[in-house]
Structures are given as structure tokens and as C-alpha cells.
Amino acid sequence: MSEDPKDPFATSMDGFQSMPTRVFGELEDRVDRGKKRLKFYISFLDDYLRGILPHDLVLIGAYSGIGKTQLALSIAIANAGQKRRVHYFALEAEPRELERRTKYQIISRLLFKNNHPCRERMNYTDWLLGDCEEFCAEFNQQANQQMLELLSSMHTYYRGAKFTSSDLQKSIELVYRDSDLIFVDHLHYIDNEKNDDNEAKALGETVKTIRDVSLRIGVPIVLVAHLRKRDQRGKQVVAQLEDFHGSSNVTKISTQAIIIERAPMPPDKWWLSPTFITIPKDRRSGSPNLIAMSNFDLRNRMYSPNYALGRAEHGEWTPVGVGDVPSWAHHHKPLQVEETR
């Protein structure tokens, strides 16, 4: 510690340090952080958020059945496909569920790539029950091989009878040195450690544990969470930050929050599901206050490479005008020319 009171780089025993001292090495640290950036591989999220950085805690929320797990899984397998090391805690899923979802996605792509005459009959429920094997069995081995070649760096964990925040912390500490990205799917399936009746308090402690771990290990964590049941009396176009179920700490500790929701508009094709994507929180740039509409393809379970931007006005989604499209929206296309392959 410098003892010269006029020294601008003097530090104190209480941990304070002058700002000029802390800025040394800032450039190198910032450039290195940029090199470690991961992508979402969802065009709207990559356009606005620019990617996932070390120490990020990304929160994904949606109402039940909208596609939280599918969105998280899409981000996970896309990164694993780029040889990033991914660890996925599937706390809600049944054993092999993520593997089956991924294999179905690959087989569906192969059917359309090969222009198979039965490609339109392919759907996840029938395939899951074994009712599509008569026309897709020939692609099983090819799909298995693709997973072996492309997703060897993707690791999944399925919970047992009980899984607490302490169990999660111990598991993360075992794998983080060999991980570039960690998923926890999802928050509300982590058991109450103390078995008390205060659910919000227990959830808050769990979230704090996850955030502490995230800051310490320097590996980004994607956390999936429920939204509260919608109040049908409201005129909200999309859910808000306060709609996340449980303690307010759930949103306070996140660096980014993402919400997806079905868009109440007719699809151009039967296999398209118009979906709203919003970013109600971003600690780096703030919320964009815009709502993206992207088509989700039910056949291959992928989002369209393009999206249309809009605003919530008078209880409805209104597309932005041509002159109002922000410079960062590289994949924005007006709704009428949205690709619907």
C-alpha cells in the first residue's frame, strides 16, 4: 500500500482503490472478454445482445408449454455444434428427453433435405411414439452419427429424487473447468433446501447461490424459469419482468432476461408458430423496448433467421416503420416479406 496521500494510485486496507489504478489493463481484459463471447444463434438475440459473455447469468422465461426448454436447447446444441463445451442440467425433463428432441430435429431436417415424400407427416408426438419409423427409420443411424460427430461436447444431467441448490453448486464446481456454457432448466425444480413453507425466500436463496457461483467461476449460466399465470383481465401484449414466478431476486440477479410468448396472429403455413421474443432486461444496453416476432418452425423446431420488430401499442403489436428500424437490427424484415420456408 502506498503511504503518499498525494499518490493517485494509493490503495487502502478496506479494499478501496483509486479509479486510475483499476483502469490499467482494462483494454486487454475487455478484448479478451470479447474473444470469449458465445452466440445465441437466435438472430434477434444476437443482433441486440451481441452474444453471451463470461459471468453472464441469462434468464429465459415463458408460460408453460410455450417453449422455454426448446429455446434453451437450441442455444445449447448450436454452441456445442461449434465445439463449445456445454453442460445442461435438465431438472424437469425425463431421461433422454433432450437427446430425443435433438435427434428428432436432425431427422426432420434430413427428411426435408432429401425431399422425402412423407416429410409432411413428421411430427414430434408420433415420432416419440414410434409411429413414424416406417418412413424415417432409414435416417436413424445417420442422425446418431451426426450427434456423435457434432455434439460430443454437449453433456446432459438428469436429476434424481431430490436436487437442492447445494447439489447444483457441487455439480457446477465439478464441471466448470471443462465448460464454456452451463444451463439450469429449470429454477423451480430445484428443491427447497430447508423444507420450510416460505417458497419465495427459499427461491431467493437458490438464486443467490447460482449468482455467487456464476461470478466465481467465470462461466456464463443460462437459467430457465416459469412465468406467473397470466391475468386474463390485462391488456399486456407480452409478459413483463415482474411476471417471473417467485422471488424478485430471480430477475434482480440476472444480467439479461428473455421472454418468449405465442403471437396472436395467423401463421402463413400450418407448420409455423409466430412467436414474440422480448428482452425486458439487459444490464449492458438496457431493454430495447421493442418486441420481435419470429416464426418457429414446428417441423424442425428452429426459429426463422429473420424477425420483424414492433411495439406494444393500445394492447396490440404494431410493426415499426421503415425509418424506425434501429441500426443493430441486421436481420429485421418487415412482416409481409418474412421468410416462411
Image (cartoon, rainbow, N blue to C red):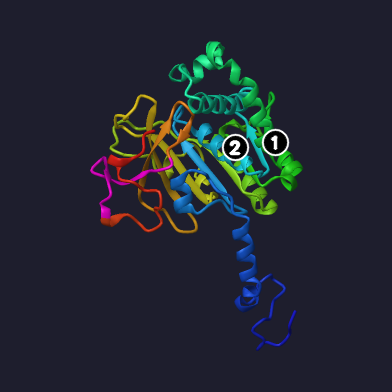
Compare residues 299 and 177 and report the one nearer the observer. Answer: 299
Q: Residue 79: percent from the left, percent from the top?
A: 60, 43
Quadrant location of the C terminus in the rendered image: top left
Q: Can residue 155 be seen in this view?
A: no
Give the quarter of the image for residue 235: top left
Q: Within 10 Å of the Cα at label 1, are there few (<14), some (14-19), or many (20+) other Cα atoms?
A: some
Give the quarter of the image for residue 10: bottom right
Residues rendered magenta in the picture: 305-322
Quadrant location of the N terminus in the rendered image: bottom right
Tell me which amino acid carries mark 1: Ser
| Kind of element beneath mark 2 | helix
Q: Residue at x 62, y 70 (%)?
A: 26
Q: Which residue is drawn at 62% across and 53% down?
A: 55
Q: Circle 1 is placed at which residue position?
A: 152
Q: Circle 2 is placed at which residue position?
A: 77
- Rendered view: 300 above or below 304: above
Q: Residue 335: percent from the left, percent from the top?
A: 30, 41
| Kind of element beneath mark 1 | loop
Say if the magenta span includes residue 312. Answer: yes
Give the mark nearer the N terminus: 1 vs 2: 2
